[in-house]
């Protein structure tokens, strides 16, 4: 048989067969080691894009490889299905969010199935379905029971367009909502929080366990947690009984304090403000309220502040210092108050200079003449360590040592202590939105906040809700849903109307997959402890902080509640790069131009005639640089698309979509196709006692491929070099002049087996063509025969002017050029031909090299 490679035909055929034979079903627990391969589940927008394709293909190759290597593999898929877009679609088009979401899921599931992914669809989860969110609610109640969920009034980010609260991370650097783009305002509201701060230290420490994570992701997490070591110090307020507590990382500079600053929202602000300053202070506070946290702390903005008229005493030196309020001091961090040390902090230096506040040096570089520097003003803040001066009993001490000594002293005196502070805040989890998981509590005037009893879960989302996009929570408008009897006292009470942040849904889905269809519990312990932690997690770098941090937090809380027995959910993490498309933008008009309208040989703007420089950028609709997966599949087949996505770049790097390289992979698969289909297994001869050199060389090529590909696919997953090795093997087979040898047969079979994880359909077809009954995907991965890798040596005679001067060992099968090189570089030749002109080199393959030199 020598037929054409018809990708569409064989892909359909095998996808159908695989479904029939349930080949991708997760095996029951057995003596095989387990491997859990997981892709970050998608939001069901309705359309699969190239970024998805790349993500899922990477995970699929790993899953298929691990199966061949003898693991029982869990490779599931699901949908992160709650969230704003469904609600917005409902508002814009009048489709109920549930309907819209389920339609999208159905559509995307079909698209995913086209990719030939070896997913166990029996374990599919969708976070918006009651059989899933029943357990999200149950988990929420676990947190509530553990004292890890609570309500408090909080200044929140308010999106005036979407009419909802946003988490800090949903606000960009310019203070805009990540979804609507509106400038975010501050508003005080009662909100639900998860106490992630209780786990700050653990979340930081355990990053060390994550050897299989990219360093940069671990650094991002550590920075987000933001641990600071310092002190808590108290300054008595003049004329009052109370004190102002500050958090500082530089207790060694406490003698340099020349003022204190409170956050405008600090409860002591009105208390310390004098009558003379009252009006000005209140006006200032009004102004600050309009600013987002990002604006308040932006480096490049001038710091704004105002005197309160009050003052406090520095307990270390009894000095009286003024109290100010300023925008850059945040109420939520530390104690909401800071001590101003302008001589040693850049921000304080700027602020003090602008406000003409005194600057007092208390740390100097070693060997500084203190008298001399106190004569002239300090040109800038000195922020380095040094020697303590102007600080009473601590003078002369290195500042690093001074930190501990000053804290010890403050502790003895009773006005301070050591303190560790984290930047991480508690997780604001409530949303005033409809399409999310309802928070399962009931508010009773008598009993307070009462959890919904387990038997009443799930609290289902009501269907008949008016979604206008305006006002607060849509659920709050539905009286029939809100009014219930208190589960405790039976009196009329009200349901909570907030829904949960969708990050909660995605903080435990990987646990649910281990036991996805359990209707009695979120997951059985034996299942979750068997499959988890995830052995390889694959997803985008955009989730490097929050999703991963929240999932780690959930895992630790559930472990502490005895629901599972591991510390960390994801053993290894691969953050795949983006898929970039060829982009045209007119620099004059700043408009993106669809590439379909452009002649690649002479790119110019069809409207203006301006010349264009193409470049690569992340594929997106607005840039007209996207390539639709379905188009590529229709043209080349999914195996080519997979091969291209794997070959073009290492998985963690960005991938530039290039039609010519897609073609290249298509041609490669065609070469493999004809190589294997033209092979005649009927003509194979008996294995001979001694392999010929050709056979030996081919065997070496085969086992080199096995070795290299196996190595490329452990740990770092260098699919691109693995595909190159496949190409080398295919070339070696094409060139090998031993088609009837059993070694050639071994080569053909190996090529198909090694190709199987990458291009599963063509490999299956070719495997079956070779006469095999059982699927290629059920075969064992080939082991390296290291004896095949050994290079035979021959003895080469080295002659000078026809006279034998010695012999050297060289690799067998070396060609003439190589032999001449070995001989020329040998010590023997060097000794005899040194300084002489070589007239001629005569090479007799496998025997000798003779140098003819000038006398
Ligand atoms: C005095 C001082 C002197 C400070 C000096 C620094 C250098 P990190 O490392 O980020 O934790 N600070 C404390 N609470 C604050 C708040 N709520 N808003 C704004 N700034 C606050 O930074 C800790 C330092 O940030 C603290 O140490 C404090 O200024 C300031 F030479 O105290 B420092
Ligand atoms: Zn009650």
Image (cartoon, helix red, strand yellow):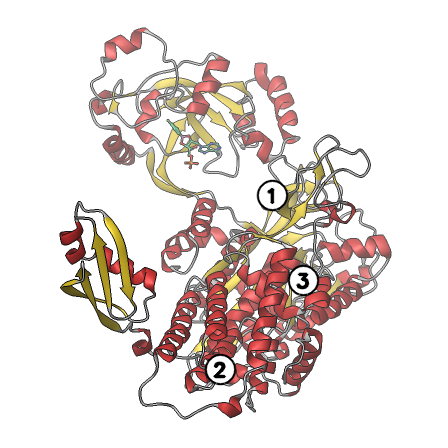
Q: Where is residue 611 in the image (x, y as percent from the top left)?
A: 72, 34
Determine whether 146 is above or below 115 in the image.
above
Q: Name the residue under label 1.
A: 154
Looking at the image, the residue that sits furthest to the top is 375
Inspect this view and state whether residue 168 appears: yes
- Tell me which numbered mark, 1 or 3, is placed earlier along the sequence: 1
Q: How crowded is mark 2: few (under 14 residues within 10 Å), some or many (20 or more)?
A: many
Identify which residue is drawn at 54% across, 31% down.
297
Q: Residues within 10 Å of mark 3 (few under 14, many from 20)?
A: many
Q: Residue 437 carries which label?
A: 3
Identify which residue is drawn at 28% across, 63% down.
843
Q: Do the residues bearing badges 3 and 2 touch, measured as CB atoms within 8 Å?
A: no
Q: Position of residue 431 (x, y in %)?
A: 67, 52
Q: How far apart are marks 2 and 1 (CA)?
A: 65 Å
Q: Distance between the residues labelled 1 and 3?
A: 21 Å
Quadrant of residue 80 within the rendered picture: bottom right
Looking at the image, the residue that sits furthest to the right is 94
SS category of the residue bearing label 2: helix
| Nearest to viewer (mark 3 / mark 2) | 2
Quadrant of residue 24 within the rendered picture: bottom right
- Tell me which numbered mark, 3 or 2, is placed earlier along the sequence: 3
| Nearest to viewer (mark 2 / mark 1) | 2
SS category of the residue bearing label 1: strand
């Amino acid at each position: 048989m020598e037929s054409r490679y018809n990708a569409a035909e064989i892909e359909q055929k095998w996808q159908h067969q695989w479904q029939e034979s349930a080949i991708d079903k997760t095996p029951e627990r057995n003596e095989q080691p387990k491997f859990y391969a997981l892709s970050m589940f998608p939001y069901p927008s309705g359309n699969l894009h190239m970024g998805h394709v790349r993500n899922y293909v990477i995970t699929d190759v790993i899953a298929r490889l691990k199966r061949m290597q003898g693991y029982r593999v869990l490779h599931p898929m699901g949908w992160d299905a709650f969230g704003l877009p469904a609600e917005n679609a409902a508002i814009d088009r009048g489709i109920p969010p549930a309907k819209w979401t389920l339609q999208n899921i159905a559509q995307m599931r079909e698209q995913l199935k086209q990719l030939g992914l070896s997913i166990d669809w029996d374990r599919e989860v969708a976070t918006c379905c009651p059989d899933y969110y029943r357990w999200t609610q149950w988990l929420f109640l676990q947190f509530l029971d553990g004292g890890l969920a609570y309500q408090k009034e909080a200044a929140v980010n308010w999106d005036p367009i979407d009419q909802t609260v946003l988490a800090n991370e949903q606000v960009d650097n310019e203070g805009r909502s990540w979804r609507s783009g509106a400038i975010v305002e501050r508003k005080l509201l009662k909100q639900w929080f998860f106490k992630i701060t209780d786990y700050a230290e653990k979340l930081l420490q355990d990053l060390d366990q994550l050897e299989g994570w990219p360093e940069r992701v671990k650094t991002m997490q550590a920075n987000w947690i933001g641990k600071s070591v310092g002190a808590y110090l108290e300054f008595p307020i003049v004329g009052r009984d109370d004190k102002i507590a500050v958090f500082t990382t530089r207790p060694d500079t406490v003698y340099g304090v020349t003022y204190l600053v409170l956050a405008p929202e600090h409860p002591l602000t009105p208390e310390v403000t004098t009558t003379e300053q009252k009006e000005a202070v209140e006006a200032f506070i009004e102004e600050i309220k309009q600013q987002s946290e990002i604006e308040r702390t932006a480096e490049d903005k001038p710091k704004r502040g105002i005197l309160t008229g009050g003052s406090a005493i520095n307990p270390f030196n009894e000095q009286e210092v003024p109290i100010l309020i300023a925008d850059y001091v945040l109420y939520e961090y530390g104690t909401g108050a800071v001590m101003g040390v302008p001589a040693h902090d850049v921000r304080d230096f700027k602020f003090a200079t602008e406000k003409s506040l005194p600057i007092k040096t208390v740390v100097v570089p070693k060997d500084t003449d203190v008298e001399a520097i106190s004569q002239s003003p300090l040109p800038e803040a000195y922020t380095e360590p040094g020697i303590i001066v102007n600080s009473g009993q601590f003078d002369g001490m290195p500042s690093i040592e001074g930190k501990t000594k000053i804290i010890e002293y403050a502790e003895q005196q009773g006005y301070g202590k050591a303190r560790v502070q984290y930047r991480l805040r508690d997780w604001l989890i409530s949303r005033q939105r409809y399409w999310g998981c309802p928070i399962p509590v009931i508010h009773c005037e008598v009993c307070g906040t009462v959890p919904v009893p387990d038997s009443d879960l799930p609290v289902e989302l009501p269907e008949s809700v008016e979604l206008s996009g305006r006002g607060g929570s849509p659920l709050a408008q539905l009286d029939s849903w809100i009014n219930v009897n208190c589960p405790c006292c039976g009196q009329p009470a009200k349901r909570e109307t907030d829904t949960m942040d969708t990050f909660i849904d995605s903080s435990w889905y990987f646990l649910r997959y281990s036991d996805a269809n359990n209707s009695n519990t979120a997951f059985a312990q034996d299942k979750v402890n068997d499959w988890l932690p995830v052995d390889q997690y694959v997803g985008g770098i955009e989730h490097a902080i929050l999703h991963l941090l929240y999932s780690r937090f959930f895992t630790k809380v559930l472990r502490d509640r005895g629901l599972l027995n591991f510390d960390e959910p994801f053993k290894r993490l691969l953050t795949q790069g983006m898929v970039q498309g060829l982009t045209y933008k007119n620099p004059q008009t700043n408009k993106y131009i669809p590439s379909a309208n452009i002649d690649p040989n002479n790119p110019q703007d069809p409207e203006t005639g301006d010349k264009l420089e193409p470049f690569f950028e992340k594929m997106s609709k607005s840039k007209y640089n996207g390539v639709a997966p379905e188009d590529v599949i229709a043209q080349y087949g999914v195996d080519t698309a997979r091969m291209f996505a794997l070959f073009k770049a290492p998985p963690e790097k960005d991938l530039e979509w290039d039609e010519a390289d897609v073609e290249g992979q298509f041609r490669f698969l065609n070469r493999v196709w004809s190589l294997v289909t033209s092979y005649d297994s009927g003509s194979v001869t008996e294995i001979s006692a001694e392999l010929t050199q050709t056979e030996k060389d081919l065997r070496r090529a085969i086992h080199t491929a096995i070795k290299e590909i196996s190595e490329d696919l452990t740990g770092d997953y260098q699919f691109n070099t693995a595909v190159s090795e496949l190409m080398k093997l295919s070339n070696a087979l094409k060139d090998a002049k031993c088609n009837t040898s059993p070694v050639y047969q071994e080569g053909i079979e190996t090529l198909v087996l090694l190709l199987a994880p990458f291009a599963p359909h063509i490999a299956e077809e070719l495997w079956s063509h070779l006469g095999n009954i059982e699927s290629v995907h059920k075969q064992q991965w080939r082991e390296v025969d290291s004896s095949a890798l050994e290079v035979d040596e021959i003895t080469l005679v080295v002659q000078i002017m026809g006279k034998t001067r010695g012999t050297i060992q060289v690799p067998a099968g070396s060609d003439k050029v190589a032999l001449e090189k070995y001989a020329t570089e040998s010590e023997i030749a060097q000794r005899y031909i040194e300084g002489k002109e070589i007239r001629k080199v005569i090479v007799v393959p496998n025997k000798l090299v003779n140098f003819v030199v000038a006398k």
